[in-house]
Image: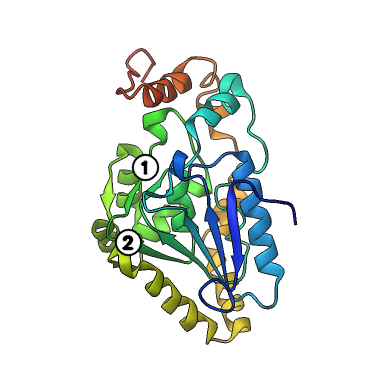
């Protein structure tokens, strides 16, 4: 395996059989770049193939953020004038294809792609100081296809549309009420709760868990297969060249509200 720059990868961390993948960019609120996603995908693949690993924990360094989604400065570079981001640009880094249980340990902000990462995990354990939100329409960074639609299976169609389209913030308790997380604990109890879930899962038949996870994939796999269409190209082919994408990201970096009034509704 290559040397990692953006993540920490530890096997048998706290609990034997548990592999922890920690996004280690706390100064950037654990936002990711293409490099981060590539490293995470490599770690997930390694954990998936290791017979001594039975559960994977995803988290972020520090206590401010789980993951704040795509690094806006990086997105400015890769989304200019239709430029493509380095592969892989999948914020789920293969966790839906990993047949071992994946736990998201949410210790702060889970924003944008960070929220995707949490709701694609099999279980989400949140600290009371966690915050969940989507920001795509706010910063001019579109997401489409099954990564959007799968949230309807987690929290229902109405709430999923509300979360995606309004970009509202939700507290850990609100996330628990809507079914976005499994449990909420005090910050000082987060690691102990994650360890308890790991131990409980590691006591179960590994083959049965793999079969169950493969079965649950049937919920969103038809959506994944049908999402080959590029909705950005079909609906807004000039999105990146019109300035609409730049306005959202520039506003975020300048700490002001974006002004999308000049773009056609």
Q: Is residue 135 above or below residue 223?
A: above
Describe the element under mark 1 as helix, strand or loop.
helix
Front residue (pair 45, 222)? 45
Q: Is residue 7 above or below residue 200?
A: above
- Residue 222 seen from this side: yes
Mark 1 in CB contact with mark 2 (< 8 angstroms): no
Is 259 on the left or on the right of 212, as rendered? left
Q: Residue furthest top?
A: 262
Reading the image, the residue beneath label 2 is 127
Describe the element under mark 2 as helix, strand or loop.
strand
Q: Residues within 10 Å of mark 2 (few under 14, many from 20)?
A: many
Q: Position of residue 200 (x, y in %)?
A: 46, 83
Q: What's the residue at 74%, 52% (across, down)? A: 2
What colouring style does the render use? rainbow
Q: Position of residue 110 (x, y in %)?
A: 39, 49
Q: Position of residue 135 (x, y in %)?
A: 38, 37
Reading the image, the residue beneath label 1 is 164
Chain-order first, disc 1 or disc 2:
2
């Amino acid at each position: 395996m290559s040397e990692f720059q953006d993540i920490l990868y530890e096997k048998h961390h706290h609990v034997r059989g548990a592999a922890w993948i920690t996004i280690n960019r706390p100064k950037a609120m654990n936002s990711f770049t293409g490099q981060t996603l590539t490293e995470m995908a490599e770690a997930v693949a390694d954990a998936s193939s290791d017979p001594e690993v039975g559960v994977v924990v995803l988290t972020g360094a520090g206590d401010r953020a789980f993951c704040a989604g795509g690094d806006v400065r990086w997105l400015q570079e890769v989304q200019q004038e239709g430029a493509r981001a380095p592969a892989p640009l999948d914020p789920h880094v293969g966790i839906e294809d990993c047949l071992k249980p994946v736990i998201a340990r949410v210790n702060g902000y889970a924003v944008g792609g960070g929220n995707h990462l949490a709701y694609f995990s099999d279980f989400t354990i949140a600290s009371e100081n966690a915050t969940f939100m989507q920001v795509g329409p706010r910063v001019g960074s579109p997401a489409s296809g099954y990564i959007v639609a799968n949230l309807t299976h987690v929290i229902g169609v109405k709430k999923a549309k509300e979360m995606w389209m309004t970009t509202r913030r939700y507290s850990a308790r609100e996330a628990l009420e809507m079914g976005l997380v499994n449990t909420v604990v005090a910050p000082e109890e987060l690691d102990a709760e994650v360890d308890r879930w790991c131990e409980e899962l590691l006591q179960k038949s590994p083959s049965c868990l793999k079969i169950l996870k493969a079965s649950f994939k049937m919920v969103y796999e038809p959506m994944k297969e049908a999402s080959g269409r590029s909705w950005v190209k079909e609906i807004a082919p000039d999105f990146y060249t019109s300035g609409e994408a730049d306005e959202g990201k520039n506003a975020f970096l300048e700490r002001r509200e974006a002004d999308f009034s000049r773009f056609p509704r």
